[in-house]
Image: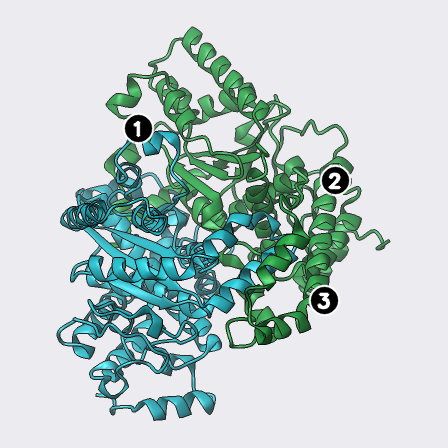
Chain colours: A cyan, B green
Amino acid sequence: MAPKRTKGASRRSAVSGGSARRQGWQVDPRQALRVGADIHLASVDQASTPGWTGGEEEAIAYTSSITPLLASLQERLFAAATDGSTRRVLVVAQGLDTAGKGGLARHVMGLVDPQGVRLTAFKAPTVEERSHDFLWRIRAAVPPAGIIGFFDRSHYEDVLVPAVNGELSEASLAARIEQIHDFERELIDSGTALIKVALMVSYDEQGLRLLERVDRPDKHWKYAASDMDTREKWFDYHAVYQRMLRATSFEEAPWYVVPADRKWYARLAVTELVLRTLAELEISWPEAHFDVEAERARVRATISAGALARYDERLASRLDRVAGRIAAVDDAARSLSADEAAGNGNGSGNGKVDGNGSGNGKVRGTPGGSTARSTARSTVGSTSGGAGRREEEQAGRAEETSTGTEERAG
Amino acid sequence: MAPKRTKGASRRSAVSGGSARRQGWQVDPRQALRVGADIHLASVDQASTPGWTGGEEEAIAYTSSITPLLASLQERLFAAATDGSTRRVLVVAQGLDTAGKGGLARHVMGLVDPQGVRLTAFKAPTVEERSHDFLWRIRAAVPPAGIIGFFDRSHYEDVLVPAVNGELSEASLAARIEQIHDFERELIDSGTALIKVALMVSYDEQGLRLLERVDRPDKHWKYAASDMDTREKWFDYHAVYQRMLRATSFEEAPWYVVPADRKWYARLAVTELVLRTLAELEISWPEAHFDVEAERARVRATISAGALARYDERLASRLDRVAGRIAAVDDAARSLSADEAAGNGNGSGNGKVDGNGSGNGKVRGTPGGSTARSTARSTVGSTSGGAGRREEEQAGRAEETSTGTEERAG
């Protein structure tokens, strides 16, 4: 296999202009960002980039390179639901004002087919919502099978806000946390992969982002004076956040604390968490539920001889390419899925997030894993999926004629 | 102003490698595709590209160039709703199996922020849905203010399917069409801009797309034997489509017939219809609903001196850029919005769709219009919006440092 690469070596390759494909995650973000029972939010460097040694440019190149794979895995998830699978994914995004939750929705969810995504932004509860249990509106927004859901704020607001405002007794707080546990286990049992991310922005950075909303006329609509009232409760929010994260991070649905002063890092990290979560599901394309030979004959009987001849001429090579892509996605998914196990045998996390690619010395298994990924990325090619796939499609265009009848690779 | 360019000249510039920015729409698609009372579907060339003289490559370049503008107008629509505007947009996409409705959703809606989009795919009605009026489930899916809705199939299926299957008396058919009229006028009155597109695929092309679903293992899930049953009713569907299009295309909510054998053209055309519809709304950024000076002082008091100094150093030039972008979007929107009036004074459409850039001789106003657009496109730059903006953000990165505190241009 590939020789074990040290972190220093890969840094040098970046400096010397090495391809972004040789960069990547030095520590699986499922490990680097996972919250343990002893998380100390005060020790989180919000400007750090745990697990990632490159900069923004490498992050953008990397994201482009994995977008076809992400889109293909998302389409498999969607397709599987038409065949009875109950698997679904739910990203729960928490964070204080300006932490970048909306940007995550736009940039991460924007990478895949909008038909496979359901976004919900939870505001302060309405009168009707307040008349129900706090989980009522949350349950109504749970994505159906095959869909990636994204919650911009969530049931966790119903712990945070009343706790900070002193409206929740200790007993009520404990009861809500218990209800959240039960609810999330129920989600998991019904086929949901949960990805809970807490975006952590620094005090100065939040101030600057608020200031920009005040200074820029095209951002005024995003500012409310109440944002400053919340900012004044900075420490109260962090105290409750820390307590909540500790109490609700469990093996099947851990919290990930994502440093968010660098927007590009937060987006990169959550993209990777979604990608690896999809990979873990190991979803194949559904089997045909019809008689392939019979339907083929039936369809062919209705098409003109000329069009059929042009189609058949290219069929074998096209099917070869499709088979190659399917195998490449399978390989890449297996490799991504295995990465955590190799990098962090017990999956228990360390409760610490720092800026130095935490757990530096022990990047076990990662070099092999990222080699496999690079191979997969370069062969996945033009799979079906979201808007971010545009480049792949452009690359594939050379093989398409302009007659329209030939352009179904897209 | 720019010298009047003839169609021949702009073709030459494409052939000689002229920039895609000098290409574009030779006829406003709102005119070229609009359905009149005398539409003859049999005369539609499904492989044609009405109004557009370039090819796929130019279409992709053009789409990239207008994506920041589209994203910016979408964000203004969204922002205006927070300030009381009731404006919204609804794309109704109809077409037979394989016509490319899903691809439209993915590629056109994928260009803007997924938070500003609501997609609904209507399947055969459920038992509960059938127990209600046919518009019940449609009304429930109407986008709220500020949102671009996309219907993949719609209330028109409730005319098409029963009419083709002989389940609807003449009187019931007429009654449903009347109900649809009333419903759509109600939508328009409540602030909705309706864009109704009928994707028209040729018989051979539909056969080939179905055949590919049978031949490719990753497409099996998209095929059902019933698709062939529907294909066998090809002429029946076209007869009812023609009747329905004639009966329900009216001034405020015309139908657009979109030739769909070339997927890139259908996507390009609907993107342009959405873009021009947004431009027509003439939406500005909401005014501040807070005391800007007071809030500025309040926020600044909470930020460290060093961070403030770095922020202030760049503030003037940043505000200049923002003002420039706002003006550029305003100009581009005005120009796009005016295009139709210049190209087609009475807005009545011609009931014909052909492959030769219909209405060739009379490209009045277009050269000036597209010059204005090109200017706007080149200066709109990194506005906020959808995933397609990624390139713009990359271009803007040079001005961002890696400290995180400086990267809020995105």
Query: Most extreme residue toward the top, as rendered?
Result: B171
| Residue toward you, B99 or A187 | A187
Frontmost of labels 1 and 3 is: 3
* Chain letter belonging to callout 3: B
Residue under pointer 1: B124
Q: CA distance from mark 3 to mark 2?
A: 33 Å
Q: CA distance from mark 1 to mark 3?
A: 57 Å
Along the polypeptide, which appears first: circle 2 or circle 1?
Answer: 1
Dots 3, 2 in contact, CB < 8 A:
no
Q: Tell me if residue A316 can be seen.
A: no
Dots 1, 3 in contact, CB < 8 A:
no
Q: Position of residue B367 (x, y in %)?
A: 78, 50
Residue under pointer 2: B338
Frontmost of labels 2 and 1 is: 2
Q: Residue B56 occupies which quadrant of the picture?
A: bottom right
Q: Residue B346 occupies which quadrant of the picture?
A: top right
Amino acid type at mark 1:
Ala
Q: Position of residue B402 (x, y in %)?
A: 51, 77
Q: Residue at x 29, y 19 (%)?
A: B130
- Residue A371 vs A211, above or below: the answer is below
Frontmost of labels 3 and 2 is: 3
Q: Tell me if residue A340 can be seen.
A: yes
